[in-house]
Image: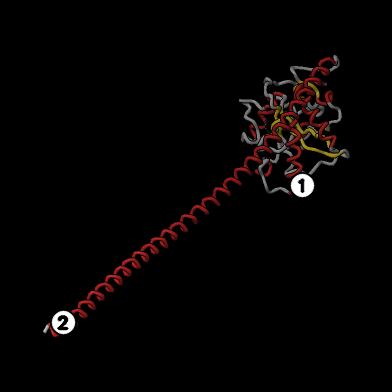
């Protein structure tokens, strides 16, 4: 009886054991499933972070490139500024030297008793006889079409202006050229004649204010070689048009080069070029009084 009972429980036990095994296996599978899906999530997260880092790296790399370019540009600007500074230092040295020369020349000219000075004006030829004089207003070959100075008018300038012109002429002579003077001191009465014909301050100074020519401190000049051949320049004298402007870009390369050369030496010698007329230069000092001196005083 007992044996029968035991035998009848065996399938039940087996079924129970199988159930336990099944539950255990299911638990293991479930656990593995869970851990594999969290690993996938981690992988996904890592991939996203990796992509984000890649993007950030790209942004940083491009910013870095921009900064390197800006750094290079700044370095270039600094080196250009250094060059300009050196050039300016050189120019300032040249001007100091010219000033010293000018003072020495001024002293020695004043010591020369024979130098005739009237109201601060001198004959330019008394200061530098190697200058070439071609006073256009003492002939009828000028924009008025008539002679407005006496035929024998000498070229006159304020003494210090004439000395600066001598310094400039010496610089040109070293290169094989000399200054040709078209006009220097101009009586105030003549300024009225000019203004009546051309009342345009770009080309003729208003006589109510007075031209610097009326003070003996402006010169109208060009350059010639030692054979007297005039150098090619952007226009003829008193061409009252845009072509006479120092900024005009339409002249021939040679004419522009010659004009810039004339301007550079004149400016380094103490003059300032008028922007609208390439031939006109003012003494930078501009401390001279207005005059209406008769040329005859100097003959
Ligand atoms: C008239 C011309 N040669 C000239 O010198 N013009 C300037 C502007 C002036 O009159 O001072
Ligand atoms: Zn002039």
In the drawing, does residue 36 fall left or right of residue 148?
left
Q: Are marks 2 and 1 in contact (CB under 8 Å)?
A: no
Quadrant of the snapshot with the C terminus:
top right
Does 178 sit left or right of 83 as displayed? right
Q: Residue at x 78, y 28 (%)?
A: 165
* Quadrant of the image where one finds ligand 1: top right
Q: Label 2: how many residues lie within 10 Å, few (<14), some (14-19) or many (20+)? A: few
Q: How is the image coloured?
A: secondary structure
Give the foreground label among 2 and 1: 2
Instruction: Decide if residue 1 is on the left or right side of residue 169.
Output: left
Residue 264 position within the rendered picture, expressed as x and y whole percent measured from the top left? 74, 36
Q: SS for tag 1?
A: helix
Query: Which residue has dot 1 on it?
Result: 254
Q: Residue 130: x, y in percent?
A: 86, 30
Q: Quadrant of residue 110?
A: top right
Q: Pick whichever, 259 or 184, lies toward us.
A: 259
In the rendering, at what x and y percent does residue 151 appear?
Answer: 80, 29
Q: Secondary structure at mark 2?
A: helix
Closer to us: 91 or 258? 91
Q: From this viewpoint, which residue is outermost toward the left?
A: 1
In the rendered image, the vertical position of residue 28 relative to residue 202, given as above or below: below
* Residue ID for mark 2: 6
The residue under the point 27% across, 70% down is 27
Q: Residue at x 19, y 79 (%)?
A: 13
Q: Is residue 107 above or below residue 40?
A: above
């Amino acid at each position: 009886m007992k044996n029968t009972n035991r035998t009848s429980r065996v399938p039940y036990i087996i079924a129970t054991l199988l159930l336990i095994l099944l539950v255990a296996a299911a638990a293991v599978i479930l656990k593995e499933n869970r851990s594999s899906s969290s690993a996938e999530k981690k992988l996904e997260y890592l991939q996203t972070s990796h992509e984000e880092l890649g993007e950030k790296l790209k942004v940083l790399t491009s910013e870095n490139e921009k900064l390197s370019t800006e750094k290079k540009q700044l370095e270039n600007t600094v080196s250009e500024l250094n060059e300009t500074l050196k050039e300016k230092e050189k120019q300032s040295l040249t001007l100091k030297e010219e000033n010293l020369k000018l003072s020495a020349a001024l002293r020695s000219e004043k010591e020369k008793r024979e130098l005739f000075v009237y109201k601060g004006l001198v004959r330019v030829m008394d200061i530098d006889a190697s200058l070439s004089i071609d006073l256009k207003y003492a002939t009828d070959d000028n924009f008025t079409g008539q002679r407005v100075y006496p035929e024998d008018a000498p070229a006159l300038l304020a003494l210090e202006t004439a000395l600066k012109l001598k310094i400039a002429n010496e610089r040109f002579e070293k290169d094989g050229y000399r200054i040709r003077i078209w006009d220097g001191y101009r009586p105030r009465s003549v300024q009225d004649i000019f203004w009546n014909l051309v009342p345009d301050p770009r080309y003729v100074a208003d006589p109510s204010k007075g031209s610097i020519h009326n003070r003996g401190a402006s010169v109208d000049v060009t350059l010639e070689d030692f054979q007297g051949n005039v150098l090619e320049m952007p226009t003829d004298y008193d061409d009252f048009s845009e072509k006479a402007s120092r900024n005009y870009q339409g002249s021939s390369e040679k004419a522009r080069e010659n004009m810039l050369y004339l301007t550079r030496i004149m400016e380094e010698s103490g003059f300032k070029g008028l922007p609208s007329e390439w031939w006109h230069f003012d003494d930078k000092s501009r401390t001279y009084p207005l005059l209406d001196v008769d040329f005859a005083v100097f003959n």
